[in-house]
Amino acid sequence: AFEQWSANAKELKKSKVVGSRVLLRWLNALLATSLDRWRTEVKERKALQRKMRQSLGKWLNATISNAFEQWSANAKELKKSKVVGSRVLLRWLNALLATSLDRWRTEVKERKALQRKMRQSLGKWLNATISNA
């Protein structure tokens, strides 16, 4: 009877060890899957942020380029008007040139503000998604 009890106790202890090992393996696999999913999401978010920055940069550069081209065209026109020498025409072109330059400056300021807001928004979004992961 004692031998039977001893054998049952050993088998019970062995089955507990095997069960805990199975449980630990299952838990480790679950954690590894979650970590891999989180890493994938972070990579995808970073790629999306990079694409957003690139497209926003292209759009902003095109806008600023157009404003600068207009300013440059107005500057060329001002240079041509110097040949004519009319004071009224020069004053009008100076005002036009100043308006174009102001527009260009405004575009640059807006671009910087938009970039700052984008960085802040992307940072908040990234922090929120990472904290939710």
Image (cartoon, helix red, strand yellow):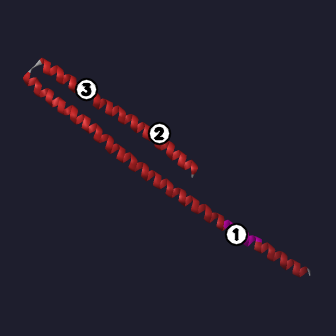
Q: Is residue 83 left or right of residue 9?
A: left
Q: Determine whether label 3 and label 2 are within 8 Å by CB.
A: no
Q: Amino acid at mark 3?
A: Thr
Q: Residue at x 52, y 57 (%)?
A: 39
Instruction: Tell me if residue 9 is in the magenta stretch.
Output: no
In the image, taking residue 96 as reference, residue 24 lies left or right, namely right
From what the image shows, is residue 19 above or below residue 92?
Answer: below
Residue drawn at (88%, 81%) of the image: 3
Does dot 3 land on a helix, a strand or a loop? helix
The residue identified by callout 1 is 21
Q: Earlier in the sequence, mark 1 or mark 2?
A: 1
- Which residue is under mark 3? 99
Question: Neighbour class for label 2 at 10 Å: few (<14), some, many (≥20)?
Answer: few
- Total numbered circles: 3
Residue 37 placement: quadrant? bottom right
Quadrant for the N terminus in the image: bottom right
Which residue is identified by label 2?
120
Which badge, 3 or 1, comes first in the chain's sequence? 1
Q: Which residues are magenta?
A: 16-24
Q: Name the amino acid, label 1.
A: Arg
Question: What's the distance in space between the residues labelled 1 and 2, CA to CA?
Answer: 46 Å
Observer-side mark, 1 or 2, equals 2
Residue farthest right in this picture: 1
Query: Looking at the picture, which amino acid does disc 2 mark?
Result: Gln
Task: Give coordinates of residue 101: x percent, y percent.
Answer: 26, 28
Name the foreground residue: 31 vs 51.
51
